[in-house]
Amino acid sequence: MPTRPLDASAPPIDTSRPFGAHVRMNWWKPLVIVSVLPVVMVLLQIVFYYAAAVIAGRDDPLTNEMTPLTLLANNLSVGVTGLLALSFVVRLAEVPWHSLLSSSRRLDSRRWKVYSGGSTLLVAAGVALVALVAPGDTGWTGFEITNTTVALLLVVVLTTPLQAAGEELIFRGTMLPAIASWVPAARWALLTGLVGSSMVFALIHGSADPWLLGYFTVVGVCTGLMAVISRGLEAPIAFHVCNNLVVTLLNSLFADGGTSTYERSVGAGGPSYLILAAVNLAVVGLVWLCERGWHRPGRWEDRTNHG
């Protein structure tokens, strides 16, 4: 296994390396991180799902039907896992927490706003195109608002951002730099971190369908690239939040007043996921264009870095 020799006097954060390959840690620590975090995520989901089933009086706690309580359980479990992942890696790798959110710069509100707005427009356009060319792939049945719909909308708006941000903290904030820390050369470290964290991200979604598995891998790689290009998590979190909000809100509104289901079995995906994959690539392009413009001398990014 390739490892970077660690100088005991060297700081745990190497600001000369790009975000995603900037964390130094002993070779065994990434093994612990990659092994522990997915298990914690799955166990917490099971606990929250069983709690939701008990409250609702259901006998099938691991159902794929997204009732308000089931959706709440899913979102909260992932959000909690994200916070635990951040705290765990901060202690294990002995790094400041903000270094896992951004590197060589401060977190800033402008990135949140720009990438949230751009992601919302691109995701909405992608979903609209899928609905136009492959309406059967949306899973929509009809527009109706009932008490169930209102409950779903409240859960989506209030907790889906926690779920999306949690996944970014787990896979791009902690797992990406952990895996990359095994490799000395920065470029190969980034490639290793992107591939490794994206594979874990895809597999943990539990789909046997090749289209879905491929799509989740694309999401993992693209959000990782957003983080690397922008040197922080604002872009991937903004995209992930907007993507999940748009998709889940529409699924709730067009469920005939009932609930939708998350199908992950073989046959659940199809070629229409190429459109959604293209949306991910488009957001990567947006991030690249924005960051390149902001890095020019005298532009906003230059002023931000110098106070």
Image (cartoon, rainbow, N blue to C red):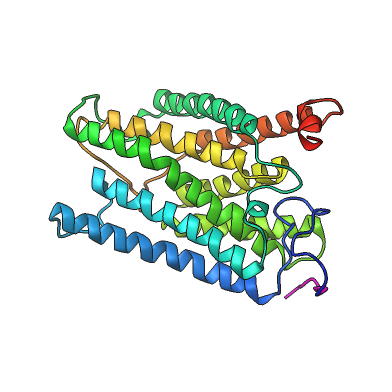
Q: For this view, does 176 lie left or right of residue 64?
A: right
Between residue 203 and residue 87, name the one nearer to us.
Answer: 87
The answer to whether residue 5 is magenta is: yes
The residue sitting at 44% across, 45% down in the picture is 162
- Examine the rendering and report whether any part of residue 272 can be seen: no
209 lies above or below 159: below
The residue sitting at 72% across, 65% down in the picture is 181
284 lies above or below 183: above
Q: Look at the image and give the residue range highlighted in magenta.
A: 1-7
Residue most extreme to the right: 297
Is the C terminus in the top left, top right, bottom left or bottom right quadrant?
A: top right
Is the N terminus in the top left, top right, bottom left or bottom right quadrant?
A: bottom right
Name which quarter of the figure residue 208 lies in: bottom left
Dominant secondary structure, magenta: loop
Residue 50 image point, x, y percent: 24, 61
Residue 3 image point, x, y percent: 76, 73
Name which quarter of the figure residue 287 lies in: top right
Between residue 49 and residue 269, name the one nearer to us.
Answer: 49
The residue sitting at 73% across, 55% down in the picture is 190
The residue sitting at 64% across, 32% down in the picture is 111
Q: For this view, does 207 lie left or right of residue 7?
A: left
109 lies above or below 88: above
Residue most extreme to the left: 57
Residue 33 image point, x, y percent: 57, 68
